[in-house]
Image (spheres, coloured by chain):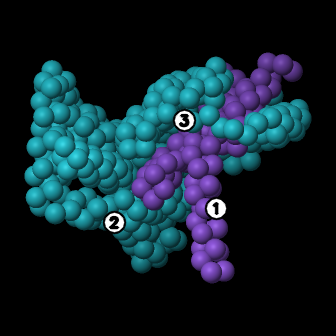
Chain colours: A cyan, B purple
């Protein structure tokens, strides 16, 4: 990973940089598996190696792929970095050794999660029970952040378009997309299975690695794959823009409502014990509902982000196209 | 000691290479890639702390007694998804900057801003 990071520093070609960043994401995902963090690895593989690489590629098509050489000397930057790094390494000298079981981090709150979560929540995957139940308030905050980022991208990049523009764009696209016949057919066969896998991850999150975040990202990845191969205008026909925005909002709303319902039933905010007649069933119901909320929001926001980037890019190409026409 | 702390040192090296990219490179996309590297190094740091020697993934089973710490996993899991959302926001800013200035190099943008300021000042004087 260090090698990849240094290669990224040296590269001037942004296309190669982004590809290396994807490799870096995949490497860190495999590192997470080795460190027993299967849920995290799952997410990182889908996000770091998949969606973020894609987004950066879309941006590069708009901004150009070459990085200009900087004139000023990077010596001062190197100095700052070395000093900071040295201080950080000095700091690590006091840290407990890697993998030791008596480190302070393992003694404070995690024994409670590991020993009691089965009785209290009844879900074998501790990560899910902590994420969705013990720290539900945190997770709610994260979902709201994702939702806000989606709104931000929407505000920044969404384009109002005219109908005749659409048709012209579609005709440019058709010529581009007809070339990849094999990929299109293979993808058509794969996409249903990706959806199925996303749903499996969504509902199996209680028992194995998985959950709303991962499922949302995988679901979005399937739709992005479709968009890439069949063109944005086709994908827009399949998935209504307003509908997908609504889904993003409904996800957050569903999550918040679970909290409010548990308040109304006499418990604390996000206290699922009161949702059903017995505590474990209530926990199961609560976790199921908020995982749905998370999944909906994450998937919808990822799709919104990608659609807006791609829409911007089409507009860009369209402008270029019409400029070329005028000049010729 | 070397093996005990090696993971943390690698994290420091990665983090510093991310920081170096952010400081020394003028290209905005490159800066975002640098931020991503920085971010991932923090993830690795948390996950390394959660590991227990001989432990297993934190999914409860009958014949396993030692589990890695689940709490950092939860924190990082959500942080990754939030990270991509914020990176997307950053990229959208880059796109808008490109549209407004016609380039994404920090120095050129600075140059254009300076020129504009000088022009408006000259107008005021005139």
Helix, strand or loop for disc 2: helix
* Residue A10 located left or right of residue A273: right
Depth-wise, is mark 2 or mark 1 nearer the camera?
1
Residue at the spot 25% in from the left edge and 65% down from the top edge: A160
Residue at the spot 56% in from the left edge and 46% down from the top edge: B105
x then y, percent, for residue B24: 70, 39
Residue that carries the numbered disc 1 in the rendered image: B114
Depth-wise, is mark 3 or mark 1 nearer the camera?
1
Of all chains, the one bearing label 1 is B
Tell whether label 3 touches label 2 (CB within 8 Å). no
Label 3 – label 1 distance at C-alpha = 22 Å
Residue that carries the numbered disc 3 in the rendered image: A67
Residue A152 or A244: which is nearer the viewer? Answer: A152
Residue at the spot 23% in from the left edge and 47% down from the top edge: A327
Report the quarter where the C terminus of chain A lies: top left
Helix, strand or loop for disc 3: loop
Residue A116 higher or lower than A158, as above or below: above
> Mark on residue A249?
2
x then y, percent, for residue A58: 37, 41
On the same chain, marks 2 and 3? The answer is yes
């Amino acid at each position: 990973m260090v090698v990849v990071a240094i290669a990224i520093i040296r590269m001037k070609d942004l296309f190669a940089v982004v590809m290396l960043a994807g490799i870096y994401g995949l490497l860190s995902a495999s590192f997470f598996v080795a460190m027993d963090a299967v849920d995290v690895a799952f997410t990182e593989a889908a996000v770091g190696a998949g969606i973020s690489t894609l987004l950066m590629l879309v941006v590069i098509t708009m901004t150009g792929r070459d990085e200009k050489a900087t004139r000023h000397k990077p010596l001062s930057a190197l100095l700052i970095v070395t000093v900071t790094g040295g201080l950080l390494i000095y700091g690590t000298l006091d840290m407990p050794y890697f993998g030791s079981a008596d480190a302070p981090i393992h003694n404070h709150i995690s024994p409670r999660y590991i020993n009691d979560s089965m009785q209290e929540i009844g879900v074998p995957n501790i990560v899910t029970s902590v994420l969705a139940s013990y720290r539900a308030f945190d997770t709610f905050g994260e979902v709201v952040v994702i939702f806000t980022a989606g709104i931000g991208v929407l505000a920044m990049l969404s384009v109002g378009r005219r109908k005749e523009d659409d048709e012209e764009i579609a005709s440019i696209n058709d010529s581009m997309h007809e070339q990849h016949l094999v990929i299109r057919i293979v993808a058509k066969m794969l996409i249903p299975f990706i959806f199925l896998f996303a749903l499996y991850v969504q509902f199996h999150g209680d028992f194995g690695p998985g959950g709303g975040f991962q499922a949302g990202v995988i679901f979005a990845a399937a739709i992005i794959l479709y968009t890439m191969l069949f063109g944005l205008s086709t994908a827009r026909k399949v998935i209504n823009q307003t509908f997908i925005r609504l889904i993003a909002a409904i996800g957050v709303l569903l999550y918040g409502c679970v909290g409010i319902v548990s308040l109304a039933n006499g418990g604390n905010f996000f206290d699922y014990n009161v949702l059903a007649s017995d505590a474990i069933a209530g926990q199961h119901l609560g976790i199921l509902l908020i995982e749905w909320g998370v999944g909906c929001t994450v998937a919808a926001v990822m799709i919104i982000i990608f659609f807006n980037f791609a829409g911007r890019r089409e507009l860009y190409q369209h402008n270029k196209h019409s400029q070329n026409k005028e000049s010729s | 000691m070397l093996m005990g702390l090696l993971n943390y040192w690698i994290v420091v090296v990665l983090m510093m290479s991310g920081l170096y990219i952010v400081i020394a490179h003028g290209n905005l996309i490159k800066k975002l890639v640098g931020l991503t590297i920085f971010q991932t190094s923090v993830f690795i740091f948390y996950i390394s702390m959660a590991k227990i020697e001989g432990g297993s993934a934190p999914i409860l089973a009958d014949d396993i007694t030692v589990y890695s710490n689940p709490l950092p996993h939860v924190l990082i899991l959500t942080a990754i998804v939030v990270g991509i959302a914020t990176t997307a926001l950053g990229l959208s800013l880059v796109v808008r900057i490109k549209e407004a200035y016609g380039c994404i190099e920090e120095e050129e943008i600075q140059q254009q801003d300076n020129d504009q300021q000088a022009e408006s000042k000259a107008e005021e004087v005139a």
